[in-house]
Image: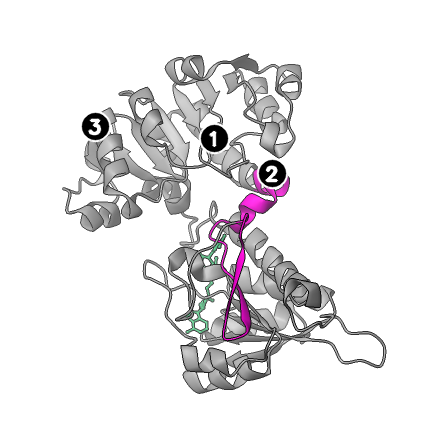
Amino acid sequence: MKIGVAREIKSDEYRVALTPAGARELVQRGHEVTVESGAGEGSAFADAQYAAVGAALAPVDDVWAGSDLVLKVKEPLPEEYPRLREGQILFTYLHLAASKELTDALVASGATCVAYETVETAGGALPLLAPMSEIAGRLAAQAGAYFLEKPLGGRGLLLGGVAGVAPGRVLVIGGGIVGYNAAVIAIGLGASVTILERSIDRMRHLDEILSGRVSLVMSSTLQIEESVRDADVVIGAVLIPGAKAPKLITRPMLAEMKHGSVFCDVAIDQGGCAETSKPTTHTDPVYVVDGVTHYCVANMPGAVPITSTKALTNATLPYVESIASNGLTEAVALDPGLAPGVNVLGGKVTYQAVAEAHGLEYTPLYEVLA
Ligand SMILES: NC(=O)c1ccc[n+]([C@@H]2O[C@H](COP(=O)([O-])OP(=O)(O)OC[C@H]3O[C@@H](n4cnc5c(N)ncnc54)[C@H](O)[C@@H]3O)[C@@H](O)[C@H]2O)c1
């Protein structure tokens, strides 16, 4: 198959959809890989590294026009819509429920659009979303430690403490992928860590894998109220699949927090879990409400593109290999978890939640897949 890797044009997006290592795997299997010149620069991959493994370098027009399968990281922007064509496969993050305009453009293009975020494992997990949650969780603990420093407006507390001085307290609300990874780094920094969860099974699992190094407590409004008051860093990591994040931290609760404490709301991409949360960017990541530093960056993995690119492509490559080697129909037959990834095919919306979000007709994938 002819596989194209387009450069990301969204502002502050430095990731690329394929590493030179991934390009080599595909070339080795007999595929033709064309990478847009400069596509890997933001992730520290030079054009020469792609050329060295047998990929071609080309300008943007040639990458889109000459590829059967186009790999990207972010959804296409309006200037990219006309580049899509019937029969072409686009594999990228799409988040279509959030944009009618983009959904209409993809439907009109006739292309097959496969979204990373809705591909599933046999157990219903989201394997192409998970690596970004791992990164965001780990970054959240780092951001918490950093913004506790006095010159940055923090309390002036070293999260790990030292011999004879107690460590800081980190409260993680939600013990899923983000929460677990935040806890691992906070423990590593020497902090005293509490995770509030509402799934008992998940808490049992966390207890096992964290070997008792964190306090695991059932989440409730009263518990959140009490725990938030004592914490130096609070990390919001809840998710209710398919819904906006619940507003678990109210303004009065926040006002009870210590002056100079830090609140990292990782769940901000789902609306945030505090009444005071609003999205920020890497260029201006924090703001202060009632003396509490809020870090609410909506695309946290964007800060570490070298790590994010590798983590993302480690997860996507097996799917790319399967689509390229088998064709989409066969790839879906071999791995039914790929089917929910197909959001739009041949002018039809094939993912029910997206169709419902925009009042469009839903066509089950198996009705349109050749
Ligand atoms: N800001 C970013 O850059 C970024 C990056 C990746 C993920 N995220 C977001 O982080 C959030 C968490 O993602 P995840 O992958 O860890 O999800 P996940 O499904 O793995 O974990 C969410 C956890 O929250 C728990 N939960 C739900 N309601 C709760 C409550 N009331 N109290 C305590 N726990 C509760 C669930 O039981 C689950 O264990 C999501 O909103 C996700 O979109 C943000």
Image x and y of residue 263, in percent:
54, 68
Q: From what the image shows, is residue 182 above or below residue 215?
A: above
Q: Quadrant of the C terminus?
A: top left
User: Given this view, does label 2 or label 1 mark the residue nearer the observer?
Assistant: 1
- How many C-alpha atoms fall within 10 Å of the one at disc 2: few (<14), some, or many (≥20)? many
Q: Is mark 1 within 8 Å of ligand 1?
A: no
Q: What element does badge 3 sit on? A: helix
Q: Is residue 301 magenta?
A: yes
Question: Quick one: 77 or 308, which is closer to the camera?
Answer: 77
For the record, the magenta segment spans 282-311
Residue 137 seen in the current view: yes
Q: From what the image shows, is residue 203 above or below residue 41?
A: below
Q: Which mark is residue 310?
A: 2
Q: Identify the residue position indicated by label 1 in the image.
A: 8
- How many C-alpha atoms fall within 10 Å of the one at disc 1: few (<14), some, or many (≥20)? many
Between the residue at mark 2 and the residue at mark 1, the CA separation in whole angstroms equals 15 Å
Q: Identify the residue position indicated by label 3 in the image.
A: 108
Question: Quick one: 333 or 302, which is closer to the camera?
Answer: 302
Image x and y of residue 165, in percent:
80, 80
Question: Quick one: 97 or 251, which is closer to the camera?
Answer: 251
Tell me which label, 2 or 1, sits earlier in the chain: 1
